[in-house]
Amino acid sequence: MDVTMHDVEARFCRSREARNLLGHWTRDNSRKHVVETMCSHTSSFTNEISSEEIARVCARIGSDEALHALGRLAKANSNEKAVRNWWPVFAFTHVFHLILEDERRLLFFDELIRHPRFRKLIWPDATALIDRLAASNSDPAFMQRVRDSVRWRIALAYYAHVKELYAGSILRERGFPVVMHPVADALFRTDLWIDNINIDLFLPNGAYRSRDSSGGRKRRAADILADAQPCFRNITLVCPAVHKFGEVRLPDQVALVGTFRAAWSSLEG
């Protein structure tokens, strides 16, 4: 189930707004390396990974605090505004997908942030942010909050990535051949798609800020692609999580599939 950048462009650019967004992105000289890298990216293992593998990684995280991306960080101490509003040149989803295809397995958080791709594509921006904030306030307590906030910010993105992969794998295993590609996510806010249907995942979780409330996803695929001809159909899936203390709160399989089947039936009807 390979998805290339050519596939993404051919599918989404029947929308003029999508063409405009893509054109602005490809012409942005500050993102030249991003464009070159992502335009040659193929999502393959991303669209094959099993829910069993993802659940196994999450179970390990739940059994060993050292593997937890947030560790002992407290949200109240990891909430610096400058970090909340920080967006590296390479989107987190870009880098997570690149690493997933490199390794063909889902890495634990500390493995991921030590990966050469991550060190090359994210750490320079993170270091520049930390240095800039240090120049304005070198107080050790403040700088510890900044460092904690950077880890918190990356950890939230990592857990959102894990949950999206899991949701996609569950739907595929239930007979819906959904696919994903990081450029479709980053540019067109489409987490998954199948045939003519775009799927926007909303994964509420009491422990972590959702993407919708983090300031990074104010526009939805349905709004961006509203001018497409022929038109897309859109499904927003609100996916309740399985709540188990100390574990990654994955979407509930029954609720996810049931919600999707109901939304699919309403579109077909």
Image (spheres, rainbow, N blue to C red):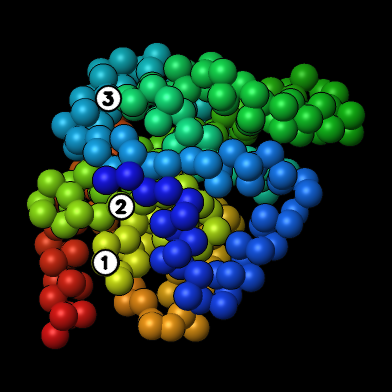
Residue 167 seen in the figure: yes
Using a 10 Å C-alpha cutoff, classify the residue at mark 2 as few (fewer than 14 neighbours), some (14 to 19) or many (20 or more). Answer: many
Residue 163 seen in the figure: no
Q: Amino acid at mark 1?
A: Asp
Determine the residue positioned at 57% across, 77% down: 16
In the image, is 83 to the left or to the right of 5? right
Q: From this view, report whether residue 140 is shown above or below residue 58.
A: above
Q: Residue 92: x percent and y percent?
A: 54, 40
**Residue 195: which numbered mark, if any?**
1
CA distance for labels 3 and 2: 21 Å
Q: Residue 207: x percent and y percent?
A: 39, 42
- Residue under label 2, please give it: 179
Q: Amino acid at mark 2?
A: Val
Q: From this view, report whether residue 157 is shown above or below residue 148.
A: below
Local secondary structure at mark 1 = loop
Of residues 37 and 193, the one drawn nearer to the viewer in this rendering: 37
Determine the residue positioned at 78% across, 30% down: 128
Q: Are marks 3 and 2 in contact (CB under 8 Å)?
A: no
CA distance for labels 2 and 1: 10 Å
- Residue under label 3, please give it: 57
Q: Amino acid at mark 3?
A: Val
Local secondary structure at mark 2 = loop
Q: Residue 7: x percent and y percent?
A: 41, 57
Q: Are marks 2 and 1 in contact (CB under 8 Å)?
A: no
